[in-house]
Amino acid sequence: MRRHAVLATFVVLPVVLLAAGCTATPPKATPTPTSTEAAYVSTFEPPAATEIAPLRGTTVPAGSLEHPSVAAKIDNHEEARPQFGLDRTDVVFEELVEGGLTRYAAVWQSDIPDEIGPVRSIRPMDPDIITPFGGIIAYSGGQQIFVDMMMATPVKNLVFDYDTTGIFYRNDVHDAPHNVILHATDAVDQAADLAAPQQQWAYSTDIATSTAALDGAPTSNIAVSFSSERYPNFTWDEAAKVWLRNQEGAPDFDAAGKQLQATNVVTMRVDIDGTYGEVPKTIMIGSGAATVSTGGKTVNATWSKADAASPIRFVDANNVVVRLAPGNTWIELVPNGVGSVTLQ
């Protein structure tokens, strides 16, 4: 009897356990831990867009130079010195005029002063020099044939002799005719419909990677002679990394008392056309010898210009395009025969 009772109990037990398993309360879900830290928000801001200044090769904010260039014929007579605004030019061409003197065809676009001058008259080579830049050309007047030549270009002409707007005035710093001044920023503001200039030359990223600095010969002084009246030179300032300009043996200062300087100095050997009598015309269409000086070094080059609207092209002895350093450039148009270039 006892044995059978034990067996009965053994048989019933699993049934009871199954019943209990069917009616048990399901386990509670474990909650997911939550972070006490704030969600990460990126503070990264992409850099502002940039572009290359067309006449300097420097990096500038995109869209900051969407205005035309303004060029002007700037007087270089002793009585016109010191000039206004030459320290802020992008490009300056020095050209021979009558009497063995020189004048400048100067161009501003990256940094336009309120006033530039003294402004003088146009010459027959100026249309070929200025046309590739487009924009504005300012001058005081000139022989009618030369004025007509400049007027025939697509460049906007501002002529003191014809002006009734007040964009020019005579200052009391110099005596006439060496005292005509242009309100340059006003001139650009009034020509907002004109396009910015095209890039004229190839540029390196810095002085050290320019063609002259990489491949040129060390140079401490660039001496140029146009005549017995005009013989400028540029000396290399290693500390400032610029060429300092002198005229007839003395430092060349602007109206603010700062010595004029350049990142790049280019000399172009040019022929002179005697068609206009005592007024020499520099021949700009064609080709010839050149030197390009940057970073205290100079490389020999060849210049060429296909037509009036084309920019001047510079190539080295291997016919590779010369790269200027970012910065301003002075170009000396040195006459073949009577002129000279001496490098030290």
Image (cartoon, rainbow, N blue to C red):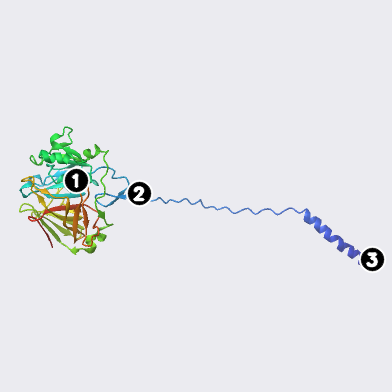
The mark nearer the N terminus, 2 or 3, is 3
Q: Is residue 114 visible?
A: no
Residue closest to the eye, 282 or 275: 275
C-alpha separation, residue under disc 2 versus residue under disc 3: 101 Å
**SS label for mark 2:** loop
Mark 1 → mark 3, Cα distance in angstroms: 130 Å
* Disc sitting over residue 1 in the figure: 3
Instruction: Name the front one of labels 2 and 3.
Output: 2
Name the amino acid, label 1: Ile
> Which percent across, then down, holds residue 327?
23, 53
Q: Which residue lies under the disc numbered 1?
A: 130
Q: Say which of 173 and 137 sits in front.
A: 137
Crowd tier of the residue under label 2, counting other residues whose Cα lies within 10 Å: few below 14, some 14–19, many 20 or above: few
Q: Earlier in the sequence, mark 2 or mark 1?
A: 2
The image quadrant where one finds the N terminus is bottom right
Determine which quarter of the picture holds residue 322. bottom left
Report the side of 36 relative to 245 (left or right).
right
Q: CA distance from mark 2 to mark 1?
A: 30 Å
Q: Can you give x and y, in whole percent of width and height, for residue 179 in the image? A: 11, 40
Give residue 108's position: percent from left, percent from top. 21, 46
Can residue 143 be seen here? yes
Provide residue 69's location: percent of width, then percent of height.
23, 44
Kindly identify which residue carries mark 2. Answer: 49
Q: Which part of the image, by quadrant, shows the C terminus? A: bottom left
